[in-house]
Amino acid sequence: MEPTLPKTYYPAMNTPDTFRLNGVTQSLTDSDPRESLLRWLKRHRRTGTKEGCADGDCGACTVALIEADGVGGSRYVAVNSCLLPVGVLPGREVLTVEALAEGETLHPVQQALVDCAGSQCGYCTPGFVMSLFVGLHEGALDDHAIAGNLCRCTGYGPIRQAARQLANDAPGDARFAALRAQARPDLPAAEIARFFSPVDIGDALALKAEYRQSDWFAGGTDLGVDLSHGKPVAPVLIALDRISELQQLRIDDDRVWIGAAVSLSRLQSDLQGLFPAIDDMLPWFAGRQVRNRATVGGNLGSASPIGDLLPVLLALDAVIHLRSLDGAREIAAADYFLDYRKTARRADELIVGIAVPRRADLRSGSAKVAKRQTDDISIVAAAFALGFDDRQRVSHVRLAYGGVAAIPLRARKTEALLIGRLLDRETLAAAAAQLRMEFEPLSDHRAGSEYRRALSANLFLRFVAELQP
Ligand SMILES: Cc1cc2nc3c(=O)[nH]c(=O)nc-3n(C[C@H](O)[C@H](O)[C@H](O)COP(=O)(O)OP(=O)(O)OC[C@H]3O[C@@H](n4cnc5c(N)ncnc54)[C@H](O)[C@@H]3O)c2cc1C
Ligand code: FES
Ligand code: FES
């Protein structure tokens, strides 16, 4: 049956095809929806926001976006404008560095950077200003607030000092608090060209059936890089970030439900303390700007062998929930990855959410090793879950790895070796030896195969050592 396009795809009086930039309404009618906000700003002579990498890596292009906070209010989030196609903007409010000062009076964030000598050439400064601005408003001025910003000349000492000064002084900022309070980030958006923003799953699936060459667009932190680099991307994009059902995060007694479009920042804050394996991994997943947009559904959709959440989902026995016009089905994370970036998900299926069982009897943890501690791609990422019977023998074991094969994988042979055994010195030596042989990792510019094998074993040994009193 031919799907009929629901009315939400057509511009209507109450669905804006405009966005607000620094409080002023801007039309998007003549804009290519795939153009990054950074390019759009440059074309419109807004030169305060800088371009460093156009890759999401340096944070020079950071702007503040107002988004719904999921509990009826709104909040500021720092995002990389180089990865944000303007197609996601209708009805939304963006602040760039130009908005902050009032005439000759600097905003407290800018003043703190001046006071602490946190700027030299100044190229990275607008990005730091916007990250600190968001940190100030959201009460999060720790190092992670600026971990997605790189500075090549000042050195981080003065910038961190500025962040500490702001945290201590906690200056009020009524002007921008009022702007945030007035924003309506959850308004439905108009369609712009071939960039759709449906508001419910049924509409999204109908669109997918209508446009077979389309792709889902969640946070865009993978797709945005392709767009930024002019790489081929599907001609039609269906944005998922206004579908409230995909934003649900539910903590039940026996499981946690993570909507596919929940941002990783929200996962980090709202699930804190529930799954140590998630807590351990998220701070090292990209920088704050990327985590503010990136989603679990996108990590599973890209299915990169070095997707950092993927071993975590394997270790926690997560179940992936898919939906298409043909119906719904579930796949265990262990059965999801088939080959390099190939998964059991059909092209017409949408990941709607991930269910993670809650098991108080298990100890879990994870670790990531990269060349640089923050904001870098994994050499190896690993996640573990262990359960013990009342004689301290291993009764449940999951050892999952990324970066050691074409897909994220569990070390099944080592798991079999461990089951039913005490974790004594002899067993651990045997497990480590088996782990070194379990995979045949590639050598590449990040690390050699032998190093990855050694990491597979040593990360597990460290996890066990940290479990013991
Ligand atoms: C600077 C930078 C640093 C990064 N660092 C890391 C890192 O440390 N670790 C890491 O793992 N990754 C990293 N990434 C990659 C990226 O952030 C993650 O893969 C992220 O989870 C992608 O989510 P997204 O919502 O942005 O996906 P998108 O870019 O929106 O989509 C990615 C793919 O998934 C598909 N997709 C999205 N949602 C769904 C859905 N619900 N159902 C079906 N398919 C879907 C899309 O069609 C697309 O093919 C980094 C990226 C950048 C730019
Ligand atoms: S320009 Fe480097 S993160 Fe956008
Ligand atoms: S002040 Fe020059 S790059 Fe940061």
Image (cartoon, rainbow, N blue to C red):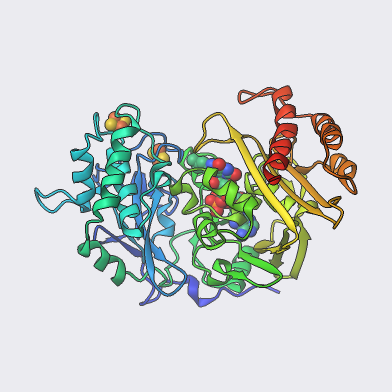
User: x%, y% of residue 126?
Assistant: 28, 42
Whether 139 is drawn above or below 418: the answer is below
Task: Indicate the quadrant of ligand 2 in the picture.
Answer: top left
401 left or right, relative to 84 = right
Quadrant location of residue 146? Answer: top left
Image x and y of residue 169, in percent:
23, 53
Numbered marks: total: 0
Picture quadrant where residue 69 is located: bottom left
> What residue do we see at 80% from left, 29% from top?
436
Q: Where is residue 239 drawn, in percent x and y?
A: 52, 60
Is residue 369 toward the left or the right of residue 188 in the image?
right
Quadrant (top left/top right/bottom left/bottom right) for the N terminus: bottom right
Position of residue 300 relative to residue 61, above or below, is below
Asked if residue 232 can be seen in this view, the reply is no
Tell which residue pokes out farthest to the left in this image: 104
Q: Nearer the viewer, residue 173 or 16?
A: 173
Furthest-front residue in this view: 469
In percent of the image, x 37 and y 63: which residue is there? 75
Residue 226 position in % (x across, y down): 52, 42
Relative side of 253 to 59, left or right: right
Report the residue at 26% width, 46% height from top.
Answer: 165
Residue appearing at x 71%, y 70% in the figure: 254
> Does residue 342 appear in the picture of this structure?
yes
